[in-house]
Image (cartoon, rainbow, N blue to C red):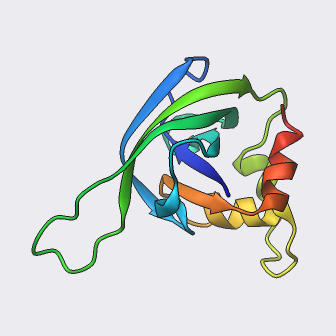
Amino acid sequence: MAYAIKAEIRDHKAKTLTFAAQKTMYGGKLIAKGDTIFLFASENEVGHGLVARGIVTSAEAVVRRPGVARQTPRVSLTIRCTALATRPLGRRELKSMTNWSNAQPGTELNFKLYRQATNKIAGISDEAEAFLATFF
């Protein structure tokens, strides 16, 4: 399975990126060393969407805090970037893809990354991975 992360990315040309205690959704907590990940610079932090593809070099679950009943699983990651995006893909390009039941990869990405404003790690389908690969 491949993954996507939407997060604050200050230097999208960096060879290695580290993300601490990132929220996970849609199977994101299953991410592991060696997985492919697509990096989206969060528009919440003045980013512009898809910026790179990489390989997870380290993935460590964050221990849950005792005494807190409902906690979103979090993971800390280190990623080695392997390619930079050559075309834009972000909130603006995915905004019109809102037919949640049409099973299209763009709609899946819009739903998982932009339906909620929060930054996150999300598992994506093989179809979404193939779609994203066309941006490199």
- Give how far across and how far down residue 118 sits, in percent: 48, 57
Relative side of 120 to 65, left or right: right
Residue at x 66%, y 35% (from the top left corner)? 48
- Classify residue 61 by image quadrant: bottom left
Residue 75 seen: yes
Along the line of sight, the residue nearer the viewer: 60 or 15: 60
- Give how far across and how far down residue 78 sits, in percent: 45, 34
Residue 96 seen: no
Along the line of sight, the residue nearer the viewer: 117 or 54: 54
- Residue 21's place in the image compared with 123, above or below, is above
Residue at x 78%, y 52% (from the top left corner)? 129
Along the line of sight, the residue nearer the viewer: 106 or 136: 136
Residue at x 51%, y 22% (from the top left corner)? 16
Relative side of 47 to 78, left or right: right
Q: Which residue appears farthest toward the left when viewing the image?
A: 67
The C terminus - image quarter: top right
- Give how far across and how far down residue 124 sits, in percent: 69, 60
- Residue 128's place in the image compared with 78, above or below, is below
Residue at x 48%, y 27% (from the top left corner)? 17
Q: Which residue appears farthest toward the front when viewing the image?
A: 34
Relative side of 79 to 89, left or right: left
- Residue 132's place in the image compared with 136, above or below, is below
Along the line of sight, the residue nearer the viewer: 91 or 121: 121
